[in-house]
């Protein structure tokens, strides 16, 4: 675009923007003097300044998409949208009302800072972006927890995490992301996730009882605390079949959430083995999707444990 042509061809100028949002640097390349850019952003003039060095080619109220585009232009090409703005684009609804903010992740070495409606977070854990309609988004799990870290309301955090789990995201993924990131702001989301997990375990117990009724086996002791002959704690089995020495564990969420919980599960199973107790582990999702198959596995495990006990007698 030749010098001066931009004034006669506003549509051509618009085509070089992102939905009407453009940087002053780009306008200068197109022949618009920088002083003209800023003069046109004064009150009552044709354009509107959105962020330092970023403006809109009209003076109306920007849309959310324009605010997102302005944020990305301001932060640079490596920026990734996270938090509430990303959650909305991922389809989540349980987000707090209030002023629209765009939370961006940028590489640690970037010097750009937060400004206006943009929250800049420098990170060593820049995620691989999921591009949606041209907008680079952090993966859903990262977006949700980045938002939760900044929310001070337990109710809002719980509502957002519950919706995320209902969408099919596993608690394991959420706990793993909490463990991988900074501990800042994680107390409330961690507490909320444990409450959700407790509810899920309660539901799993109901499903487990339904499966047990299909087996014809004697009823186990539910949530039964087991100790060895010295009184040392072994575990609290979800279901314990006394006659067979069989513990049935409804182990969920990819072996109980994260690294520490996985290690605890391994240690528990080692205590079972040392005490001569056979363990059957079942994922709670299978209680609902494959009840007959799980019932058959439970019967087979019971028979094998019972035979082992007879041989040891």
Image (cartoon, rainbow, N blue to C red):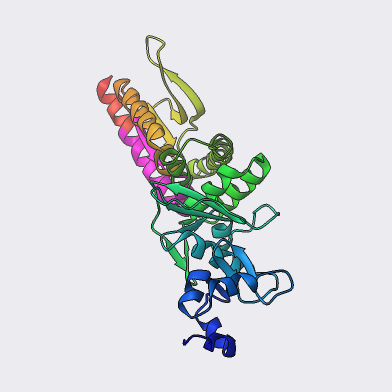
Q: Position of residue 53 (x, y in %)?
A: 54, 64
Image quarter of residue 11 = bottom right
Please state the horizontal and vertical placement of residue 143, each as a whole percent of the image.
51, 53
Q: In this rendered view, identify the residue nearer to me: 277 or 130.
A: 130
The answer to whether residue 134 of the structure is visible from this angle is yes
Quadrant of the rendered image containing residue 217: top left
Q: Is residue 257 above or below residue 108?
A: above
- Image quarter (top left, top right, bottom left or bottom right) of the C terminus: top left
Residue at image position (55%, 51%) is: 114
Could you say where residue 72 lies in the image, as x and y percent from the top left?
50, 63
Q: Residue furthest top?
A: 230
Q: Position of residue 60 (x, y in %)?
A: 70, 73
Q: Residue at x 50, y 41 (%)?
A: 208
Q: Is residue 258 magenta?
A: no
Q: Nearer the viewer, residue 312 or 79?
A: 79
Reply above or below: 237 against 158: above
Q: Residue at x 56, y 76 (%)?
A: 19
Q: Work out whether residue 52 or residue 14 is closer to the camera in this orientation and state it.
A: 52
Given residues 119 and 281, the one toward you in this image is 119
User: From the viewer's perspective, is 271 left or right of 16?
Assistant: left
Span colored in magenta: 278-304
Residue 244 in view in this figure = no
């Amino acid at each position: 675009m030749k010098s001066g042509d931009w004034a006669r061809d506003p549509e051509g100028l618009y085509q070089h923007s992102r939905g009407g949002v453009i940087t002053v640097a780009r306008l200068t390349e197109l022949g618009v003097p920088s002083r003209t850019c800023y003069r046109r952003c004064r009150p009552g003039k044709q354009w509107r300044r959105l962020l330092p060095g970023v403006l809109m080619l009209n003076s109306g109220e920007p849309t959310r998409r324009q605010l997102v585009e302005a944020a990305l232009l301001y932060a640079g090409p490596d920026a990734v949208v996270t938090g509430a703005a990303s959650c909305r684009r991922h389809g989540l609804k349980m987000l707090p009302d209030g002023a629209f903010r765009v939370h961006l992740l940028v590489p640690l070495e970037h010097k750009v800072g937060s400004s206006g409606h943009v929250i800049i977070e420098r990170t060593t854990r820049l995620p691989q972006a999921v591009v949606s309609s041209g907008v680079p988004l952090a993966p859903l799990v990262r977006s949700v927890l980045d938002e939760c870290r900044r929310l001070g309301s337990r109710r809002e955090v719980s509502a957002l995490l519950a919706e995320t789990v209902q969408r099919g995201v596993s608690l394991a993924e959420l706990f793993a992301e909490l463990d991988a990131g900074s501990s800042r702001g994680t107390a409330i989301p961690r507490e909320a996730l444990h409450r959700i997990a407790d509810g899920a375990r309660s539901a799993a117990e109901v499903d487990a009882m339904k499966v047990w009724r299909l087996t014809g086996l004697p009823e186990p002791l539910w949530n039964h605390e087991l100790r060895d002959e010295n009184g040392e704690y072994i575990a609290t089995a979800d279901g314990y079949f006394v006659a067979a020495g069989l513990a049935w564990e409804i182990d969920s969420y990819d072996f109980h959430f994260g690294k520490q919980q996985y290690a605890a599960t391994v240690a528990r199973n080692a205590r079972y083995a040392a005490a001569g107790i056979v363990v059957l582990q079942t994922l709670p999702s299978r209680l609902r999707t494959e009840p007959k198959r799980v019932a058959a596995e439970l019967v087979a495990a019971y028979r094998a444990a019972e035979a082992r006990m007879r041989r040891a007698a």
